[in-house]
Image (cartoon, coloured by chain):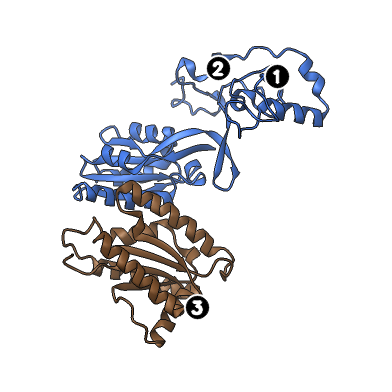
C-alpha cells in the first residue's frame, strides 16, 4: 500500500487560511490503513484546523470534512462533485495521486495536500510502516530471493553487501537490517546460495521514474473510443 | 483573572472514575463545580477527536480518568487511552494550545477523595493557565459543550450495559 503521514497543522492552516470554505477530503483506501487520511484522521484534522484558524483570527473560514472510498479513481470522485461546488478549496488527505486526481476533476477549485506521501510499503508492526518497493518498473525480486536490494539496501547494491554491513545491520542507519544479510540468510535457507556466484546484471533504470510519468496500458481492457487509441 | 469560570470536561470510566465521583458525592466531599462529567464504558472509548472536539466546543481543560493500570475491565482500554491522550497533546501543541490542559489520571472506584483531588488539581492548573486561548474573548461555549454531552450519553449508556 501507499504509506503517507500528515503534514503539520500549521503548514496546512497556512495553505488554506485565505479561503472562505474548505472541504477536507479523506480517502478510504491506503491512507486509511496507514492511519494518515481515513475518516477518523480527517475528523481529527478538521477539528485541529478549525481551532488553529481560530487562534490566528481566521475563525470565519469554514472547514468541513468528508471521506470518499477512493480518491485516485474518477468514478469514486463522482459522489463528491455536487458537494465541491459549495467550497472554494479542497484539502485532500489522499496520497499524491489522490490530490492530483481531485485537481484534475475540479479545475476551478484550489486543491491542497494534507499529507506527505512517503512510499510503497507494508505494516511492519502496529503503528510502524516500512518501505518495501521503489516502483522501479523492472522487478528483480525473483533473482534476490524475494528481498529487494534496490529498496532495502541504502546503497542499492546488486552484488553483495558493502563493507559497512555489521552484525546484520546497515552502516547508514544502525537499526536497519542489512538487505544483503537478509538475502544471504534466506538464500541459504532455500538452498540457492550458488545463484550469487554469478555477477548480477546492471539494473535497467529505463523503466524507472526518471523519464517522467509512466503509463501502463492494457489494450484488451480499453473501451473502444475511450482508450489510448481514441 | 477571567470573566467566567474555566470549564473542565472529565471523561470518566464507568467502572472507576465515575463510581469514584459518585462516592465523592456520597462522602460529601467538596470539589470545584466547574467540572462536567461524561461517563464512558471504558476510557478505551476515548478517541482523539473526542478530546479535540471538547476543546473546540469550549472546554478549558479535559480530564481522562480511567482504571488503575492493570485493572481495566477491558484489559488495556486505559493503556490505549493514555497513548491517545499523549497523541492529542502533541496535536494541541501543534495548534498552539497548552498540552497541559489535557491530562490522563488513573484511579479506582474506591477513591472518592482522589477524584475530588484530581478535579481540584486540574482546576487549579487551568486557572493558572487561564481560559482556553480559543475562548478568551468572552465566548461562552458551555451550551455547545452541553450539546456534546447530550449527544454522546445515550450511546454510552447503551454500551455500558
Q: Is residue B27 visible?
A: yes
Image location (x, y in percent) of residue A152 = 61, 28
Rendered image: mark on residue B109: 3
Q: Which numbered mark, 1 or 2, is in the foreground of this view?
A: 1
Tell me the element at label 2: helix
Q: Residue furthest right?
A: A191
Image location (x, y in percent) of residue B48 = 42, 56
Between A144 and A152, the residue placed more toward the observer is A152
Q: Which residue is drawn at the image coordinates 46% and 19% (left, top)?
A: A229
Residue A34 is left or right of residue B95, and the answer is right
Between A28 and B51, the residue placed more toward the observer is B51
Between A13 and A32, the residue placed more toward the observer is A13
Tell me the subunit letter for badge 1: A
Tell me the subunit letter for badge 3: B
Rendered image: mark on residue A160: 1
Which of the marked residues, 1 or 2, is nearer the chain's N terminus? 1
Tell me the subunit letter for badge 2: A
Q: Which chain is in brown here? A: B
Q: Give the residue number, with chain letter if any, for mark 2.
A: A207
CB contact under 8 Å: marks 3 and 2: no
Residue A230: quadrant of the picture? top left
Q: Which chain is in blue here? A: A
Amino acid at each position: 500500500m501507499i504509506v503517507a503521514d500528515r503534514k503539520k497543522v500549521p503548514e496546512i492552516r497556512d495553505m488554506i487560511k485565505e479561503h472562505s470554505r474548505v472541504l477536507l477530503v479523506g480517502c478510504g483506501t491506503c491512507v486509511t490503513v496507514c492511519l494518515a487520511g481515513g475518516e477518523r484522521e480527517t475528523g481529527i484534522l478538521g477539528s485541529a484546523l478549525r481551532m488553529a484558524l481560530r487562534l490566528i483570527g481566521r475563525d470565519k473560514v469554514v472547514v468541513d470534512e468528508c471521506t470518499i472510498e477512493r480518491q485516485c479513481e474518477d468514478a469514486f470522485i463522482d459522489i463528491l462533485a455536487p458537494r465541491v461546488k459549495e467550497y472554494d478549496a479542497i484539502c485532500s488527505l489522499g496520497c499524491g495521486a489522490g490530490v492530483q486526481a481531485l485537481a484534475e476533476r475540479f479545475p476551478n477549485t484550489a486543491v491542497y495536500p494534507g499529507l506527505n506521501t512517503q512510499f510503497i510499503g507494508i505494516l511492519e508492526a502496529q503503528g510502524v510502516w516500512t518501505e518495501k518497493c521503489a516502483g522501479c518498473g523492472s522487478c528483480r525480486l525473483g533473482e534476490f530471493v524475494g528481498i529487494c536490494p534496490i529498496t532495502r539496501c541504502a546503497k542499492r547494491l546488486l552484488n553483495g553487501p558493502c563493507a559497512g554491513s555489521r552484525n546484520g545491520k546497515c552502516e547508514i542507519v544502525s537499526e536497519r537490517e542489512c538487505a544483503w544479510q537478509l538475502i544471504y540468510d534466506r538464500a541459504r535457507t532455500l538452498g540457492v546460495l550458488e545463484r550469487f556466484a554469478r555477477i548480477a546484471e546492471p539494473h535497467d533504470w529505463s523503466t524507472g521514474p526518471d523519464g517522467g510519468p509512466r503509463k501502463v496500458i492494457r489494450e484488451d481492457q480499453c473501451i473502444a473510443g475511450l482508450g489510448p487509441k481514441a | 483573572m477571567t470573566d467566567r469560570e474555566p470549564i473542565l470536561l472529565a471523561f470518566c470510566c464507568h467502572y472507576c472514575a465515575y463510581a469514584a465521583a459518585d462516592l465523592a458525592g456520597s462522602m460529601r466531599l467538596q470539589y470545584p463545580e466547574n467540572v462536567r462529567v461524561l461517563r464512558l464504558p471504558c476510557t478505551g472509548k476515548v478517541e482523539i477527536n473526542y478530546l479535540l472536539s471538547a476543546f473546540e466546543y469550549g472546554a478549558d481543560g479535559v480530564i481522562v480518568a480511567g482504571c488503575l493500570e492493570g485493572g481495566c475491565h477491558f484489559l488495556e482500554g486505559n493503556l490505549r487511552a493514555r497513548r491517545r491522550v499523549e497523541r492529542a497533546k502533541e496535536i494541541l501543541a501543534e495548534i498552539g494550545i497548552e498540552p497541559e490542559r489535557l491530562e490522563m489520571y488513573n484511579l479506582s472506584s474506591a477513591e472518592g477523595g482522589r477524584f475530588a483531588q484530581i478535579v481540584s488539581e486540574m482546576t487549579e492548573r487551568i486557572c493558572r493557565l487561564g481560559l482556553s486561548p480559543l475562548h478568551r474573548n468572552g465566548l461562552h461555549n458551555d451550551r455547545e459543550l452541553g450539546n456534546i454531552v447530550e449527544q454522546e450519553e445515550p450511546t454510552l449508556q447503551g454500551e455500558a450495559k
